[in-house]
Image (tube, rainbow, N blue to C red):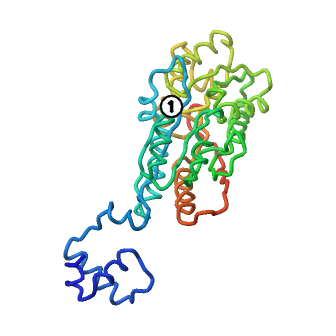
Amino acid sequence: MDQVAAAAGVSRATVSRVINNAASVAPGIRDAVQRAIASTGYVPNVAARSLVTRRSNSVALVISEPDRPDDHSFLNRIFTDPYFGRVTAGATGALRPHDVHLVVVPTDSADHHQVIRYLRQGHVDGVLLICSSEHDPLPGQVHALGIPAVLSSRPAAPLPVSHVDLDQRLGARLAAEHLIARGCRRLATISGPLDIPAGSERLEAFRTAAGADAPAVIGDFTRAGGEAAAHRLLDDHPDLDGLFVASDLMAEGALRAVQDRGRRVPGDVAVVGFDDSSPALECRPQLTTIRQPVEEMAAEMAQLLVAHIDEPGRATRSVIFQPTLVRRASA
């Protein structure tokens, strides 16, 4: 900073005010200091700055999954499921202009105490929290810390925390209505896990539109899970002609199962997925699906979190995005 001050012909204190975006610096002096910073290659020491600002300029993306006895691939799914990659991309893009870095923290219930300790130690300024189970205690635990947080879905229990979500019921209804409109009469669905709000809401809304007795098999939001669930449905209901699958990744597996049975898509079985993620374009035929604007939702979460960090005590908000039907070849 002494070198920058000498190059700009100002005091060290003036350099500090420019670096910290103080409003009291005249534009001409600010420009001179910024030119000196560029010419000297000065970079602020983040550790030293955080002692003054009480900010880490980092936020955590905490991805919390419930314990499932038959699931040993939690970390693998975190880094291979397109949904989590889209969330990370959307949040990172929104945080970059604020010079805030994203730290990804996957966890299950066994590691919750480590996550809470990490957050309590002040490593990050706030939390973007994705919880898959409505029984997950982590949202309440994070709120109790007093750290700014934004949830990726409506909290199961009343909690004064901002959240961003999708109208899940509308999405499932759009899928059912599309299958009915194209002439399907024997509809079925592969849902997500029912302890996940998105899974239960999509199933309930689909059955409201398609009929309360519409066959359903519970899946796990994986490609292999979708394939296995589709085989079970076709074993029990070989005449089904319309299938709604609650994620594109499961739908990719379901398409494989349908075609392995010698059934044509969409001639014999029309298939609609959910998400509009990369698997929808990789399927053959390409997948008709319900678009969930994940990147935009994650960006909104990040913007809300920055606002809460900058303005402690700011009123909480809920932002609900609307799904849309994307027509492709599978239905």
Relative to 12, is 109 above or below? above
**Residue shown at the point (63%, 50%) measured from the top left:** 163
Which one is nearer the viewer's eye here, 36 or 12?
12
Amino acid type at image mark 1 = Asp
Left or right relative to 269: residue 211: right
Left or right relative to 271: residue 124: left
Rendered image quadrant of residue 228: top right
Left or right relative to 129: residue 49: left
Which one is nearer the viewer's eye here, 316 or 189?
316
Number of numbered tags placed on the structure image: 1
**Residue shown at the point (46%, 34%) measured from the top left:** 81
**Residue 236, horizontal then vertical, whole percent:** 67, 10
- Disc 1 marks which residue? 108
**Residue 147, horizontal then vertical, whole percent:** 55, 53
**Residue shown at the point (40%, 62%) measured from the top left:** 99
Left or right relative to 143: residue 47: left
Relative to 303, is 224 above or below? above
Which one is nearer the viewer's eye here, 81 or 245?
81
- Specify the quadrant that holds the N terminus: bottom left
